[in-house]
Structure formats: C-alpha cells, structure tokens
Amino acid sequence: GAVVSQHPSRVICKSGTSVKIECRSLDFQATTMFWYRQFPKQSLMLMATSNEGSKATYEQGVEKDKFLINHASLTLSTLTVTSAHPEDSSFYICSADLREEEAFFGQGTRLTVV
Amino acid sequence: AQSVTQPDIHITVSEGASLELRCNYSYGATPYLFWYVQSPGQGLQLLLKYFSGDTLVQGIKGFEAEFKRSQSSFNLRKPSVHWSDAAEYFCVFPMDSNYQLIWGAGTKLIIKP
C-alpha cells in the first residue's frame, strides 16, 4: 500500500532554534499534503494544507511565519517550526492526498522544546 | 455544521471481552466515515471505511463497524479484544469540499489482563 514517511520521529531542540520536519510520499505523487498537530488529550487539529508549487493554506489561528510549510515537489513537504518555544512541544503528523477518500499518514514527529 | 463526536474518552475492557466504541456524526447527507487507530509509538492506521452500500463494514484486525443512519452513528466493534488492541481510536469524517478530515476527539482503549 501507499507509504508516507515522516522524519524525524523524535526531536529535542533548544528554545529559540528551528526544527524541520519532512514528509515524503514514497510510492505516489501527492499534490496535496496536510499537516496536523495533536495536543494532549485532544484530537488532531489541522494546521495547514500544503499544495505542490504554491503557498500553503493555513487554518485560523496558526501562525504562518512560525510554521513554515514548503511543498517543493510532488513527493516532499516540509514543516519548519521557527524560533521554537516549549509551548510548541507537540506531536506533528502529516498526511498525503486522499485517494478513494483515504488519507495516508506519516508516523508522526514528537517535538520537545527545552 | 459537520462534526464527529466520540463520547467516551477512555474505555477499559478485559482481554477477551467484547468491545464497542461509539461515534456519532452530524451531517445533512450520508457521510463517508473512517475509523483510524493510533498505537503507542506508531503512526495512524486505517481500520475500516464506509462509503455507501452495506452498512456493516469489515476492517482489519478483526474490527467491524455498523453505519446506522437513524442514529447518526458509526460504532466500532470487536468480539474479543487482545492486549495489542490497546491504543487510541479515532472516528473521522472527510469533508466534501477539499477532503480535509474532521476528527473525533478519540477514545483511548485500555485492556485489563
């Protein structure tokens, strides 16, 4: 089946630094990828929709200058958390395209900002 | 507005017992509905999906779900749970317009030995 690879699975960074998370579709081309964030004891929240070759569409309340999304190719989207703070610590998940109404998810990235 | 509700935040069942996880949706027409599972340390995995047709849907790992329009529900069931079923389960509804997903809050399943 289709595979989406997300890297890294875990990252710890210092406050004020930036972290890049990659999301790759390994065996299909994804014109659209979605980035989600999971808060403790809450469901996944959509952060932004990433379209290949164009600017991402951010959900209300998500700071686009803080969460930079780049979708430079049909198989790669990146999320960069800039000037990270402890409150950015969370679980981030990407998903790629819905084919036949199914989304394919990355493994997720656990970000800890210290 | 379209929404998905999972009323149970936690459910504890004994290994070998039957399981039912509740999911209710709010939508004006027949929705597509999914159940996903997130196991500890792993990514999300699709258990099953409902588009139309048979209201009883079979999924992986011995799970099934039944779509009931009259109750606006899509409950997930398993006749006998295994310790490896301990995970968080999400009922998910893809929106029409752009295939974004509306997520239930999730139900954490705890298995007692």
Image (cartoon, coloured by chain):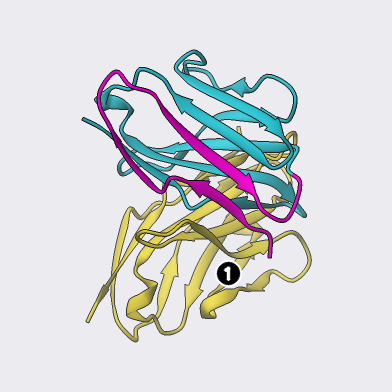
Chain colours: A cyan, B yellow
Using residue B13 as the reference point, say whether residue A71 is left or right of it: right
Residue at left 41%, top 44%? A109
> What amino acid is at disc 1?
Ala
Q: Position of residue A90 (x, y in %)?
A: 34, 37
Q: Chain of mark 1?
A: B
Residue at left 43%, top 45%? A8
Tell me which corner region of the image, top left, top right, bottom left or bottom right, holds residue A111. top left
Q: Residue furthest top?
A: A65
Residue at left 57%, top 42%? A23
Residue B91 or residue A39, whichever sits in front: A39
Q: Which residues are magenta?
A: A1-29
Vertical placement of residue A97 versus A77, above or below: below
Please give the residue where the numbered disc 1 appears in the rendered image: B65
Location of the N terminus of chain A by quadrant is bottom right
Using residue B57 as the reference point, say whether residue A5 is left or right of it: left
Q: Position of residue B66 (x, y in %)?
A: 60, 69
Tell me which corner region of the image, top left, top right, bottom left or bottom right, holds residue B56. bottom right
